[in-house]
Amino acid sequence: IDSESDVSNVISEAIDLDGYLHVSYYDTFGQNLMYATNSNGVWRTEVVDSSDNVGKYNSIAVDPSGKVHISYYDATNNDLKYATGNYDSWSISVIDSTGVVGEYNSIAIGSGVVYITYLDYSNDALKCAAGSGNSWSTSLAIEDAGFGNSLMFADGKLQVAYISQDNELCYASLNGSEWSTQTIDNSSSFGKEIDIDTSNGRPCVAYYDTITHNLKLAIRGTNEIWSKQVVDDVTNVGSWLSLDIDSMNKIHITYYDILNQDLCYAVFNDAWDYWILDNSGGMCSAMVSDYNDKQHVVYIDLVEATTQLNYITNSGAKWVLETVDEDGITGEQSSIAVDADGFIRMAYYDNSTGSLNYANNVNGWEVEIVDNSTRMVGLFPSMALDADGNVHISYYDMTGSRILKYANNIAGDWTIYTLDGSGGVGLYSSLAIDGNGSVHIAYLNPTSNNLKYTSNSGGDWIIGLIDNSGMVDGRVSLAVDSENIVHVVYYRGGELMHANQMPTGWATESLESTDQLGGGISMFIDDQDQIYVTFYNEVLSLLKYINNVGGQWNPAEVIEAEGNVGIGSSIMVDDNGDEHIAYVEKTTTGVLKYVEKRNGIWMFQKVDLQGCGDHISMAMDFQGRAHISYYDSVSKDLRYASSVVVPSAPLNLTTTVSDGAVTLHWEAPASNGGANITEYAIYRGTSTDDLILYDDVSGVANSYTDLGLENGVSWTYRIRAVNSEGSSLYSNQVVGTPCTLPGAPEVDASGRDKAVLLDWNAPDNGGAAIIEYKIYRQNETGFFVLIATVGGGETKYTDTGLENDVEYTYQVSAVNPAGEGQWSEKASATANPNNDMIMIIAFVIVIAAVAGAGVFLLMRRKGKI
């Protein structure tokens, strides 16, 4: 991240809601407070405060709006300072200048307020500053405080771990205006480098023993008693460490081995696992987890002249490699696609038989021959799927006159066409299908070095020229935008060209005019009709990339220049607008490599080190998983690589309730991300805002029962699916209220003109609100039939359209979340118009009586009577 500064002492890291990273640190050279971020796609660093000797102790936080907040120590004036803003725009203020204050500061944000705890060295105390806008207040938090503290705002309150004057590890929380304190560990002497986080509402503190140099972890139980454990008693732990607990409650700790100068990492998931992340650095580290529960670590790297700021992450894709066809020499050229159900389709050339083959994994890998009509048919295939999932393949028949051929399986079996039999044509074809289902193919005429085109968009196949300059050479890539406009990128005389189809012909433009280009090329067009292109500089042997995002072509950039990279490449763009590029590094056997944009940063990986030919193809499924077909140049087999990602969210979460229990039901995710679902994580809370990880069940389960609940108390639930790569997004949210079935209503029935009025008392609701009432009426055969449903707040119903002087019999039931309760006793009444007249007369009598009483009182008041 920063190789120019001499980074020392303390670094701090935060992640914003978009997944971008923010780092504060200290540069010994300039004695400045520094800031680094990848928020615009590349790491940028700058000086925040260049005053003399500031930032040796610092802490960073980001609020929900993305605004950055940094607390830091001014060693020249012994003050606590604060900077807020974003890259290239900072506002700086002094928070506390009373005495020697500001060392070992820690910052947190909660409920729109910025909090900072820091050492008051003059009084051996820990102070707390609270700020909202430009208004700050400072107060004494804890007496008898030593070096080191770590602050968090969790569960609606401030919580801080700190080292006392006696080097004991302590904990304090702010309840209202009072701080309450606890001793966590006084069994030894502990280092000032500590960190605090929370797991399901329980504070956790990572720390180390300065005598044994053991790494330790303390967790506060629900009984407010701290349990302590040794995490690592082998490594000689010292210096700054970092604790992070992800959304699945996995505990992650980075720490430093002072003996071997290693950056170490420990993770707890049922048991502790240990890793060395860097064997030449890590004296100070900071770590955060992103929304995919992947870790991002910044640390001080030890080099000979200076200590630089480095970054390491495990957020790159994981890969599964398979052999598709190992029968002979197969797959030197291939093309891949993913259907709507996530199954893989491949077209490829079988060198051993000289045929065009097709493979799919609908029922495991199955291979079939598409065309073996000549001795060398099926070279350089290009494949696409139409809206109905039918396969379309263009390919080169190198036998005899050398022609362009095309096959599809629309009729079920393969139908084969010769599209251009003029001879010496069809090399490096590229096929795409537009929104109307029409097929478009661009291909090379290597004899005349012209670029040709054919399409059936008008019904019949029509052949034309895109570029007849006589200088076209190398591979071709064709794609169609949302307006069904065809785009082609290709090489002409060593320069990169783009052509798009116009009503009057083809418009061409040069994207890069150097004469050094050739070899692999790939194009992708996104939903906004923005074009992305990878291409190869065959003179300098480097992979390049260009796009027209924003409406015009942006300057090309080098993706990788180390080694001979990019002779074959394929680019895709996911729904987030992040680019994914598979490419070949040309070595003795070839290496398959992959790079993707994550949080705006290019993340590089090696997919297969054992062998990769020059020609590769890549497709991406609806979940953003990459699928690559390639040729293993060592085993001579067709190979397939797929990335593993987190699953999609579980589907259709519902609840059923019973006495003291809520049962959740769900369906498996649409995609497991390429790896088996290992568990489902159950989140529960009293509302959306306080959901915590409550329990987990097997990855093959589709239900879970929460027992021992109080009837009438509602609980909110969500679940997540988990695989080896992490956890999915949340499912839909449901609410369950445990209860028993409601009681039976007491029903009265009375006749009306061609109607019956039902009136009932609300029964015992069983512990949860009545949802509805069901009204049943007995029919001529004696059976009761549901005739109406009314809301849970209703206690009356009029059954109309009846025959007068006929008796009708009814029963009513109540429904709550547990289901339908017992039916009421039968209630009968005869529809009768006289009952309406009686009611009218009674009503008139009541009104007259009320009116008469009113007149009497009025006359009496006036002394008339």
Image: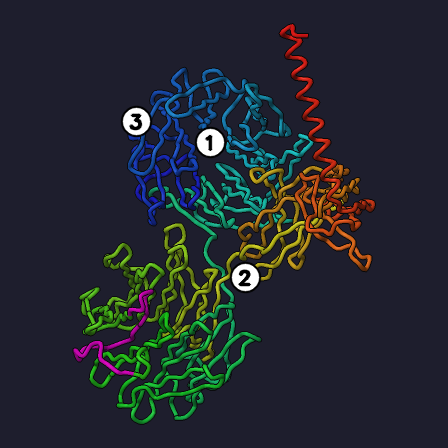
Tell me if label 3 and label 2 are in contact, CB under 8 Å. no
Between residues 117 and 334, which one lies in front from this camera angle? 334
Q: Which mark is residue 26?
A: none
Q: Amino acid at mark 1?
A: Ile
Residue 503, visible in the rendered structure: yes
| Residue ID at (51%, 46%) | 264
Q: Amino acid at mark 2?
A: Ser
Label 2 or label 1, whichever lies nearer to me, is: 2
Q: Residue furthest front?
A: 864
How far across and down, in percent of the image, does residue 583 sit? Answer: 37, 67
Question: How many residues crowd mark 1 within 10 Å: few (<14), some (14–19), many (20+)?
Answer: many
Between residues 647 and 143, which one lies in front from this camera angle? 647
Q: Is residue 173 above or below residue 621?
A: above
- Earlier in the chain: of badge 2 and badge 1, it is 1
- Find the distance from the CA under tag 3 to the CA under tag 1: 28 Å
Label 3 or label 1, whichever lies nearer to me, is: 1
Residue 473 magenta = yes
The residue at which mark 1 appears reads as 109
Q: Is residue 751 left or right of residue 404?
A: right
Q: How many marks?
A: 3
Question: How many residues crowd mark 3 within 10 Å: few (<14), some (14–19), many (20+)?
Answer: some
Label 3 or label 2, whichever lies nearer to me, is: 2
Q: Which quadrant: the C terminus?
A: top right
The residue at which mark 2 appears reads as 671
- Earlier in the chain: of badge 3 and badge 1, it is 3
The residue segment tinted magenta is 462-485
Residue 104 magenta = no
The residue at which mark 3 appears reads as 52
